[in-house]
Image (cartoon, rainbow, N blue to C red):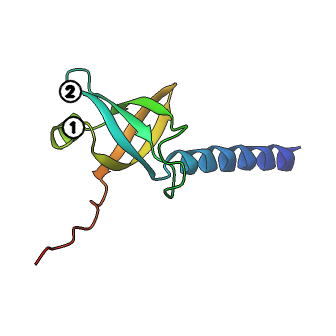
Amino acid sequence: MKIAGMIMAATAALSIASTSVLAQQARTGMVTRIDRISGTITIKDMPDGTTGANTGAATEEFKIQDGARLNALHAGDRVTFAVSETAGTKTITKIDKADAVTKIDKK
């Protein structure tokens, strides 16, 4: 019985760990709204690739762990971010502006 209990505990721990890893996957999106007072940001998910990039994208509101990070962001910025969910609240743990489109120098 002790072995069965240990196996079940290990399985539960692995399940929780894999959920946490999935929650920390890097996502890409476009900032649509920033509320610096409440420390929230609304981001429209951008699908990978360019096919259908403007259709069907979900918009979600997130709390942000470090409110000072919002000062460098503006609506329309493309960002990469990581989200964790605790007690039903989605919180951005990391956010960075995505690389800008390469500029072509005119001669």
Q: Mark 2: few, some, or many residues within 10 Å (few <14, many ≥20)?
A: some
Distance (Cα) linking label 1 and label 2 = 7 Å
Place of residue 85 in the rendered image (x, y in percent of width and height, measured from the top left): 49, 34
User: In the rendered image of this protein, does residue 58 appear above or below residue 87?
Assistant: below
Place of residue 63 in the rendered image (x, y in percent of width and height, measured from the top left): 35, 29
**Contact (Cβ within 8 Å) of mark 1 with mark 2:** yes
The circle drawn on residue 56 is: none
Q: Amino acid at mark 2?
A: Arg
Q: Mark 1: few, some, or many residues within 10 Å (few <14, many ≥20)?
A: some
| Residue appearing at x 63%, y 43% in the figure | 16
Instruction: State the residue in front, 95 or 17.
Output: 95
Rendered-image quadrant of the C terminus: bottom left
User: In the rendered image of this protein, does residue 51 appear above or below residue 107?
Assistant: above
**Element type at mark 1:** helix
On the image, which quarter does residue 37 sit in? top left
Q: Earlier in the sequence, mark 1 or mark 2?
A: 2
9 relative to 75 in the view: left or right: right
- Residue closest to the far left: 107
The residue that label 2 is drawn on is: 36
| Residue appearing at x 15%, y 74% in the figure | 105
| Residue appearing at x 50%, y 58% in the figure | 49
- Residue closest to the far top: 38
| Residue appearing at x 53%, y 44% in the figure | 23
Place of residue 34 in the rendered image (x, y in percent of width and height, measured from the top left): 26, 29
Place of residue 18 in the rendered image (x, y in percent of width and height, measured from the top left): 62, 50
- Residue closest to the far front: 107
12 relative to 17 in the view: left or right: right
User: In the rendered image of this protein, does residue 74 appear above or below residue 89?
Assistant: below
Rendered-image quadrant of the N terminus: top right
Q: Amino acid at mark 1?
A: Leu
Instruction: State the residue in front, 89 or 105.
Output: 105
The circle drawn on residue 70 is: 1
